[in-house]
Amino acid sequence: MALRTLTAKSAAALDAELMSTGAFSLDQLMELAGLSAAQCLHTLSPPTKTPRILVACGPGNNGGDGLVAARHLYHFGYKPSVYFPKQTKHELYARLRKQLEQLKVPFVTDFTAAAKEADYILDAIFGFSFSGEVREPFPSVIATLASMKVPVLAVDAPSSWNIETGPPSDGPGKEYMPTALISLTAPKPLVKWFRGRHFVGGRFVGREVAEKFGFDVPAYRGGEQVVEVSLDDVKL
């Protein structure tokens, strides 16, 4: 089955509809996205192989997905740590952080040092709504992601990539190519430039809604929340 991509504009409109007529809350959508990201990492590399996971979280919803993923990774048997330098005062994020603190999941302040100790990194810094300039402290973080040999799973987009036009022409993200990418709900146009393993996750949208917004629901198996999709099977 060939999958159609979902543009940034359509993705934003889909989220708006899901939280209005779809009756989903932001908490629910974040929980489903974070669970999918955690299950994707487990598919890539189980905790017996790569127990130490560094989760890099940005200040927006993508960062919230990362916080949720860190909690699930803990319960899956990993030893996650979280880099979350730009913390919003939004009550939802405060609760997500509190849940991790209760599990004794450490929050780190030196990304480069923590990355050197990690077996895998989850990039949940910027998602489909990112545009414009990468601001501190994230340029050095993305440069580290681009230069290190530690494998990386990007959540919905490699951070600093434009959702429509892919990697930036210059700056820290120019050479950034994660090991794997999980597209939430549907692939975005940036997959045209991606060269790693590609997954789709977020198993909660019906086919009627998918058709309305012009994307396809992949064939999930059993109780799985993610499915690996060949880049050759994505309609660009």
Image (cartoon, rainbow, N blue to C red):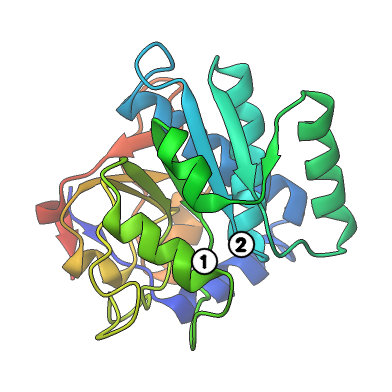
Above or below 183: residue 225? above
- In the picture of the structure, the residue carrying the numbered disc 1 is 126
Q: In the shown orientation, is residue 77 left or right of residue 170?
A: right
How far across and down, in percent of the image, does residue 21 sit? 72, 64
Q: Decide: few, some or many residues near mark 2? Use Cα within 10 Å; few <14, some 14-19, many ≥20.
A: many
Query: What is the quadrant of residue 177 in the picture?
Result: bottom left
Above or below 2: residue 67? above
**Nearer-the-camera pick, 181 or 49:** 49
**Nearer-the-camera pick, 55 or 187:** 55
**Nearer-the-camera pick, 211 or 195:** 195
Report helix, strand or loop for mark 1: loop
Spot the residue most to the top.
48
Please tell me the numbered disc located at residue 58: 2
The residue sitting at 85% across, 38% down in the picture is: 98
CA separation, marks 1 and 2?
6 Å
The residue sitting at 18% across, 68% down in the picture is: 193
Pointers 1 and 2 in contact (C-beta within 8 Å): yes
Can you see residue 158?
A: no
**Nearer-the-camera pick, 173 or 29:** 173
Query: What is the quadrant of residue 210 in the picture?
Result: bottom left
How far across and down, in percent of the image, does residue 106 sit? 70, 33
Q: Decide: few, some or many residues near mark 1? Use Cα within 10 Å; few <14, some 14-19, many ≥20.
A: many
Spot the residue most to the left.
232
- Give, as a three-letter code, the residue at label 1: Phe
Report helix, strand or loop for mark 2: loop
